[in-house]
Amino acid sequence: MTRNEKLKSALVMVLVFAVFALALTGMNIALAPAIERSAAAGELAPLYAVMPDAAGFEPLYTAADPASSGLTGVSDKVQGVYAETGGAGYVLLLSTSEGYTKEPIGITMAVDAEGKISGVEISAYPETKELGAGYMDGYLGQDSTLAAVSLVSGATYSSSAIRGAIEAGFAALIDNELVGAGVKGDAQLLEELMPMAFSGMANSAGIAQYEEQDISAAGYTYIQKSMKALTGTAMAYIVKDGEASYLALCNCAGGCKVVDVEGNDVTADVPAIVDEAKADAAKNIASNTESDYAKFARMVGDRDTDNTALLTALPMEDIFSSITGVYSITTADGAQFYGFVSTGFGYSNMPFVTYYILDENGAITAMDADELILIKEYFTAYELDEPSYKAGFAGVTAESFTGEQALISGATVSSDAVKTAVNDVFAAFDQLMKNGGVEA
């Protein structure tokens, strides 16, 4: 090959590489926006999952750098807030560790411009109890009141944690005037009063636990909704008289009280409502008096369970806690004691029944339980010497009870249930003494 031919060959190679480089540069320039969009779509995939028709997203808040945001008062359950660039609404990344396992539950929620949930997904769920197929769909279309969303029986902690995170997300939007707040109806306001007006309808976390009863064929005059505690020991009713709505609450001893939407006790003003609620409760709540007699007879050493003369059931019409039985106990030597039964909520909202005997001064002399650890075959990590645990309550008074006496290592739900029960027992004893003790 001549020198000129070599130069021509080299020149051709240079031109080929130059053309290829220009083509590649042009391709990169042309594809750059698409590549950027693809990368952004990958990062924002959870947002598009709940708002698939979004034109794009503008970040308004990130928990990693809250100071750079104009949003204020945002809960730590809110990890991110994004505005849809076309004005369709907002997407929030939420996280809560208030479930049963205390591990983070992740939720992605889309809220439209009208303040209603248009999409919602669970992104992380470490809980042992399943929520059930389609549970999250119940949030679709709901505004900040979440009026039609119920908790899941058996997964109360998890479903309550999710609801709490979603409420925190709505609060971030509403407090920063991004969407308007929904308006709660009277029925919802009354149901929210239930754990405060009747703690026996709620678990130790203050979450009402009930099953709605079918009243379609009952023909009631006032009752609009009937709710039976999962323990089977209490009833609650949404009632209506004309334009006014109330919450009627009935305990297992025939006690009934009625409150209005502001929580005021109006029992004396609505006798007809009280009568209807009491009549229904009497059909739905079974008495445990006979089994209570037998239990206390054994606790005081009287093995003759047919001899109930020493045990007398006392009125508890004004007790609306976990207490489901109050008894006067007079021993053979004439000593006076008082027996209290607490029926609270244990694991998976199962009835958790404990018994206490107090002396005339309000000190516990004996404590017992049907089962301190429910479903023993399932739980193995707890530490409990039952005789020593029960004996540890002897001599405890309202003043000396710290809650530590109720602790069962590795059994948080049982510990909380006992703690609630003991506090309710002391409160019931005080109420009993105010009413005159045995003469009540």
Image: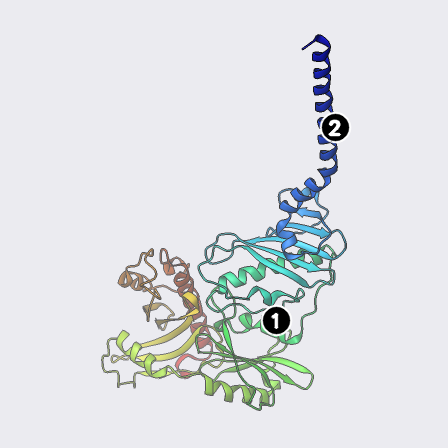
Q: Amino acid at mark 1?
A: Ala
Mark 1 surroundings: few (<14), some (14-19) or many (≥20) residues within 10 A:
few
Q: Which residue in the rendered view is the most extreme toward the top?
A: 3
Q: What is the secondary structure assignment of the residue under circle 1? A: loop
Dot placed on the residue nearer the N-terminal end, 1 or 2: 2
In the image, residue 214 above or below residue 97 = below
**Residue in view at x 54 percent, y 59 percent:** 161
Badge 2 density bin: few <14, some 14–19, many ≥20, Cα 10 Å: few
Dot 2: what SS? helix
Give the residue number, with chain letter if any, for mark 1. 148
Query: What residue lies at 50% left-to-right and 61% top-to-bottom?
Result: 158
436 vs 306, nearest the viewer: 306
Please identify, in this view, whether the residue under mark 1 or under mark 2 is nearer the observer: 2
Question: Which quadrant does the N terminus fall into?
Answer: top right
Residue 374: percent from left, percent from top? 35, 66
Q: Residue at x 61, y 71 (%)?
A: 148
Separation of marks 1 and 2 at Cα, in angstroms: 61 Å
| Residue 381 % position (x, y) | 33, 55
Q: Is residue 78 above or below residue 351?
A: above
Q: Which residue is mark 2?
A: 22
Q: Which three-letter amino acid code belongs to the residue tagged 2?
A: Leu
In the rendered structure, the answer to whether residue 3 lies left or right of residue 320 reads right
Asked if the residue under mark 2 is in contact with the one under mark 1, i.e. CB atoms within 8 Å, the reply is no
Residue 131 pos. (x, y %): 50, 64
- Please identify the quadrant where the C terminus is shown: bottom left
